[in-house]
Image (cartoon, grey):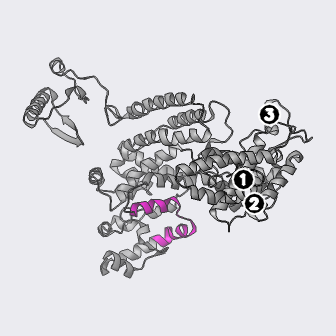
Amino acid sequence: GEQKLALFADDVLIFLTQPNQTLPRLMTALEEYGSLSGYKINVNKTQILCLNFKPSIRIKNMYKWNWDSEHIKYLGVALTKDLSKLVEANYGPLTSKVKSDLQRWNTVPFLNLHSRVESIRMNILPRMLYLFQCLPIKIPQKYFDDWDRMLAKYIWQHKRARVKYKTLQLIKEKGGLGLPCLKEYYYAAQLRPLICLSSPTYSAGWKDIEVAITKEVPIMALLADTKLQKTTPYTSDFMYDSLLNSWNEIIKKCKLGELSNILRWCAYDSEFVPNKYDDRFKRWISKGLTTYHSFIHKGAFSSFETLKTKYGLGQDDFYRYLQIRHYFHQNLKTVYEQKDLGFLQIFLTLTRSHSQNNIISRLYKGIQQCTQGSTEDIKKRWEKEGNMVISHDSWANICQFQWTITGSNTWREFSWKNMIRYFITPIQKRHLGGGDACWKLCGVSGANHFHIFWECQVISNYWTQIGEHVNNVFGTKIPLKCETLYLGDVPVTNWNNNDKKLLGMLLIASKKAITRKWMRVESPTIEDWTNIIHEIYVMEKLSFSLRMQKDIFYKIWTKWTEYIKPLRSDFV
């Protein structure tokens, strides 16, 4: 019979034919080797998987293993007899474990919204990513839907969501919380092997095997050529089918249809007729001329002299060069010049990189850039309620400002909640059966976010005083507007980082004073404001002390302590 060995660190995977005869001989040989080498095999840990073999009673009695097992498990991955059961065998138990963990974490009282998102990113995501990378298989959409529902319930603790799930998945600089999008991470993990296969600097045993299998038509030549995908035999293999399916999905999501054709290989392009009659194009592959993009230099199609020098083409290749250049100008040039490469540029950059680090995270960011939305709808609501105009640059500054002012995740999250319209106002409570009148009894009905946090006449004097104090602290003139003092779009281009951070913390405290008197008639006071600033001051001082950075702390807070010292001696 035929025997094969696969070695993985200190584990051995043995493939046997005719086990009734070969297995006893194998075990005898292993025992002899153990007696000579001093090594001992832990037979109790042995797993066995029978493929097209029914063990005899004799062999079962000789070796008390689980002969009826439908799968073996190695390094956390279940390998099944039936490949169609791979998804359920691996993701079924993982889903159950994640669900159990989320239920247990729900009982932790001190986890705030940001902490729950971070726990998903740091605990749930790595477990998912491990299987995404180990198993190049299609995952039905119902799994992603179930996971999203589980995570949403955990994030909102089985209460009604106050922020869209898609908004939470945006990066923080765009107004989100950076909640991982599992499906996009799955796509990124599935595309990683394509990066490795196409990288000339990456080498690994598995790559040698795959290159040998795809030698006739390299898998990279199939990426932008769906017609070629259908006619290439090995694409029926479940692994290649999964890789190509993930690639095609990303091309659709990023709307890169025609533009992706620049990744076609001129030697295999199903629509480039000359390659069907001239094998010389295939010889160019070893020289480095593969995709149409490889002919491009600084946005223009390279001259023949340049290609001769760079790739060693001969003079007899000139006519082939003309054929490719004609095809490019006729079919690809217009699209190439009109559209930004976007995700394709990230993909191409990774294939040329000498480092294989952070491939998945960089692919994920690239996918996010072209598929995810924005907080434009939230910006428009602020504009409508406040009858104001917020430019795209200003909104970008507002979104970023929330995360740069302090190291405290509690205060960062609170500032983000204000910007994202997290809090429930009277106009929203109207849908729950309550009235929509302002609870500060100012006489206004339909009280929305802009009214509650800024426009209400009961708190107008409070904001005037805040503006005066802030201007006195920094010796400047900040406009008394909602978009500046409340949302944080302060013109601080020429400010140093210390002043920016101090300003941010003063503004956070001004908003916190309002929510501390939520649903109460009276207005917050300057004393409330300074008390909250003192709370922030104490915790910031402690944090910087633990990091041995007290000098930086005093540089940030000096302007405030000098200003407030005559009134509050506890600021030391």
Locate residue 473, reporting x and y percent.
Answer: 75, 60
Q: Nearer the viewer, residue 493 or 335?
A: 493
Residue lying furthest right: 443
In the image, taking residue 528 as reference, residue 189 lies left or right, namely left
Quick check: 50 above or below 349? above
Q: Is residue 165 magenta?
A: no
Mark nearer the viewer, 2 or 3: 2
In the image, taking residue 365 as reference, residue 508 lies left or right, namely right
Q: Are marks 1 and 2 in contact (CB under 8 Å)?
A: yes
Q: Give the SS element for disc 1.
A: helix
Q: Which mark is residue 473?
A: 2
Q: Amino acid at mark 1?
A: Leu
Q: Give the residue number, with chain letter if any, for mark 3.
A: 431
Which quarter of the rendered picture does the N terminus lie within? top left
Mark nearer the viewer, 1 or 2: 2
Name the main secondary structure of what is drawn in magenta: helix
Q: Amino acid at mark 2?
A: Val
Q: Nearer the viewer, residue 515 or 534?
A: 534
Mark 1 or mark 3, earlier in chain: 3
Quick check: 370 above or below 517? below
Q: Are marks 2 and 3 in contact (CB under 8 Å)?
A: no
Q: Which residues are magenta?
A: 328-352
Q: Is residue 333 magenta?
A: yes
Q: Which mark is residue 506?
A: 1
Mark 1 or mark 2, earlier in chain: 2
Q: Nearer the viewer, residue 269 or 155?
A: 155
Mark 2 or mark 3, earlier in chain: 3
* Residue beneath the point at 82% across and 58% down: 468
Instruction: Indicate the quadrant where residue 535 lies.
Output: top right
- Residues at marks 2 and 3, CA–CA distance in whole angstroms: 43 Å
